[in-house]
Image (cartoon, coloured by chain):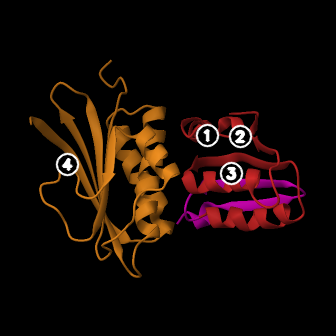
Amino acid sequence: MSRSRQDLVRIDLPAETDHLRLVRLVVAGLATGLGADVDDLEDLRIATGELCAHLMDRSVPDDRLEVEVETTETSGAGPSVRLIANLRDTTDVDVLDELAEVVLGTTTDQCGLGTAPWAERSTPGASGWFERAVRASSDA
Amino acid sequence: MSEDLFEIAVEGDTISITGDLDAHTAPQLDAALDPLLERGADPIVLHMAGVKFVDSSGLRCMIRARHGGDGERSVVIDQPSSATVRLLEITGMLDQFTVRGAQ
């Protein structure tokens, strides 16, 4: 696969929901740099909050959430945002409930729990991921 | 972090919400809803002009306002942001609420 990595941000924070806003802000900031429009940004903020909240809600006490946000550009396609969130100590995060599945499925191009398809290695703990293309007309 | 920017004010059967309505702050809206559901308020008005972000936790509160307690009631979503309307649309919940004055 031909791709150039454009930006990568890693955040390591307590797995507590009062930090959700911070993660959403980081993702929105990176997406803004790609030229994301309002709809892209809203979808990315919603997806980020949904996935991270699901993991945080199921984390063991004192766990930490590591979030890796990557902006990529695959040849032939536009830029996209990829996010992997990984709980360090928690091993079981259950399945997404119906509402969360609808929200994530609608606001991302692909998403799931477990190891991301593009991850170079699996990490210990429980993970979730999504990818969302930015369809904004940054080069228009 | 979200908590510092989140406020709820209740006046009669109207709840005014300011800030991000997410997994961290949604329990505060649930707590504000409890007495309204107990006394059978209908309709319940959620004034959401100050809400710039809602996730499924917030949406669950809105669904609870509609269907919680003793049966169904009318819920008016007053002045929702485009983000709130979008969440209602993508989840197929828009027709569950009366939307008034979308921004």
Question: How many residues crowd mark 1 within 10 Å: few (<14), some (14–19), many (20+)?
Answer: many
For mark 2, give the secondary structure: helix
- The picture places residue A83, in percent across and down from the top left corner, at 30, 51
As drawn, the chain in orange is A
Are dots 3 and 4 in contact, CB under 8 Å? no
Are dots 1 and 2 in contact, CB under 8 Å? yes
Looking at the image, the residue that sits furthest to the left is A1
Tell me the kind of residue under disc 3: Ile
Looking at the image, the residue that sits furthest to the front is B71
Tell me the kind of residue under disc 1: Leu
Gap between marks 1 and 3, in whole Å? 10 Å
Q: Have a look at marks 1 and 2 and say if they share a chain.
A: yes
Gap between marks 1 and 2, in whole Å? 9 Å
Question: How many residues crowd mark 3 within 10 Å: few (<14), some (14–19), many (20+)?
Answer: some
As drawn, the chain in red is B
Give the residue pinned by disc 1: B88
Gap between marks 2 and 4, in whole Å? 37 Å
The answer for which chain carries disc 4 is A
Q: Quadrant of residue A1?
A: top left
Tell me the kind of residue under disc 2: Gln
Question: Residue drawn 68% across and 51% down?
Answer: B63
Question: How many residues crowd mark 4 within 10 Å: few (<14), some (14–19), many (20+)?
Answer: some
Question: Residue drawn 30% across and 77% down?
Answer: A89
Give the residue pinned by disc 3: B63
